[in-house]
Structure formats: C-alpha cells, structure tokens
Amino acid sequence: MRATPVLPDPSPSGPVAERKAAWRALVRRTRSELVQTQGPAGRARQAELLASAGLGWVRRYAAATGRPNLTGLTVAAYRPIRTEPQVDALVESLVRAGMTVLLPLTLPAGALDWTRADDPAGRPLGPRALGGADVAFLPALAVDRSGLRLGQGGGYYDRALSVLAQPVPTIAVLHDHEVVPVLPAEGHDIRVGFTLTAAAGVDPVGTG
C-alpha cells in the first residue's frame, strides 16, 4: 500500500467495544471538519477522482476475469451520507457503462434489502439480491492494513455480505486519511480486499 497520512489511534488500550466507539467518534468528527474545509469544489473533485479510479478498476477487473462486456456485471454500491466520500458520480458512471448497480435499502432488525440504481421507483429486490454481485463497493469509517473494516456500528454489512458468492472483490470507499495501521476487532467484523480513495485509487489491503 502507498504511504498516506492516517488518523492517530484514539484509544490504543481497553475493551474492544470502547476502542471502536472512540474510533467512530474520531472519524465522524474528522469527517465533519473535512467536509467543511473541502467546499463544493473540493467535493466535486473528490467525486471525479473516485469515479474515474473506481470505474477504471472495474474495467480492468472485468477484462482480467474474461468478462469485458460490462453489461453482464452486477456491482453493489451505495448513496453516501453528507460526510462520506462522494460516490454518487461513481454510481452514475457504473450505470452509464451498462452495469447493473445495486443500492441498499435499510430494513428493520439490522438487515439490508437492495434495489437497482436505475429504478426510479426503488423497488426492493430482496436481501439475497446481493448474492449476484460481481464487485461490491462498501461504505466504511476506516480500514486497517489487514483489511479490517470499521462500520457505523449497526452491523448491517457484517450480516449482508454473508450472501456474497466467493470470491467477490470488496472495496471500501474512504477519505484519504482513513486507511490506518490497526483497528480493534471483534469476531463478527468483516475484512475487505481493497480500499478506494481519491489520492491512491484502488489499493489492495490484507490479501487483496
């Protein structure tokens, strides 16, 4: 992985749940500050870089796996909340390239349903629709060098990704400073194979 500035560990010792809570608080605070300093022009530039790098990586992956026809690919993605990296342009680029793009719908009891990004009605396809994905772009607060993903704490993706066929590339989309050396882990936490940032593009983590 490329060397980039990272967040300092806010709680290097203590119970795992408390350490994860400290990490979430730090990332959320830092993200709020970052969005204020980026401004509209900075956010637009981030969106452009993420879209270019993400689409380029999917094209190369499809070609390397003998599927150059992008219209046959299904990609899971998401719509970002205010302080998350700007992936709307990436979603739109994937749709324009002819891929089926799945977006999550939140269900009760910590589950995710899915709908097509090009369906204006947002009709649900069922939680197991994710099982047909060839690539998955995921939200995350941070990822460490082993691929461990820190989420928002609801466990939605920890549960949802269990339906993915193997092997499926999982790519966490982050701000540049959110790839960190080590995160606290619990047994249910998932690991991703790659990170996507505006500065570094798609980089492997862990085993990739």
Image: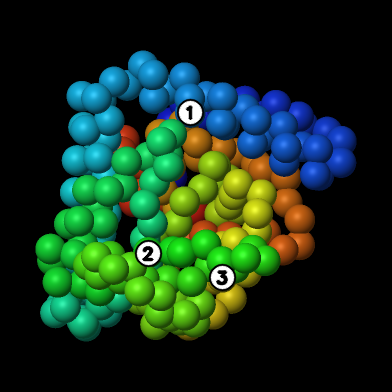
Image location (x, y in percent) of residue 49? 22, 40
Q: Label 3: which residue? A: 160
Give the camera-side residue of 100 and 67.
100
Earlier-in-chain disc, 3 versus 2 = 2
Query: Three-letter amino acid code at disc 2?
Result: Leu
Question: Could you tell me which residue is drawn at 51 percent across and 48 percent down?
Answer: 140
The mark found on residue 5 in the picture is none
Whether residue 64 appears in this view of the structure is no
Q: Secondary structure at mark 3?
A: helix
Whether tag 3 and tag 1 are in contact, CB under 8 A, the answer is: no
Image position of 190 with respect to 151: above or below: below
Q: What amino acid does circle 3 point to?
A: Ala
Q: Residue at x 73, y 51 (%)?
A: 185
Q: Under tag 2, what secondary structure? A: strand
Find disc 2 in the rendering and name its residue.
Answer: 103
Q: Which mark is residue 31?
A: 1
Point out residue 181 in the picture as x, y percentages from the top left corner: 60, 39
Mark 1 is surrounded, within 10 Å at the Cα level, by few (under 14), some (14 to 19) or many (20 or more) other residues, namely: some
- Front in this rendered view, residue 9 or 28: 28
Q: Secondary structure at mark 1?
A: helix
Question: Which of 129 and 5 lies nearest the eye of the viewer?
Answer: 129
Query: Percent from the top left, x then y, of residue 170?
Result: 45, 64
Rendered position, 81 above or below 63: above
Residue at the spot x=65%, y=59% of the render? 155
Q: In this rendering, does residue 92 appear at all? A: yes
Say above or below: 54 vs 111: above
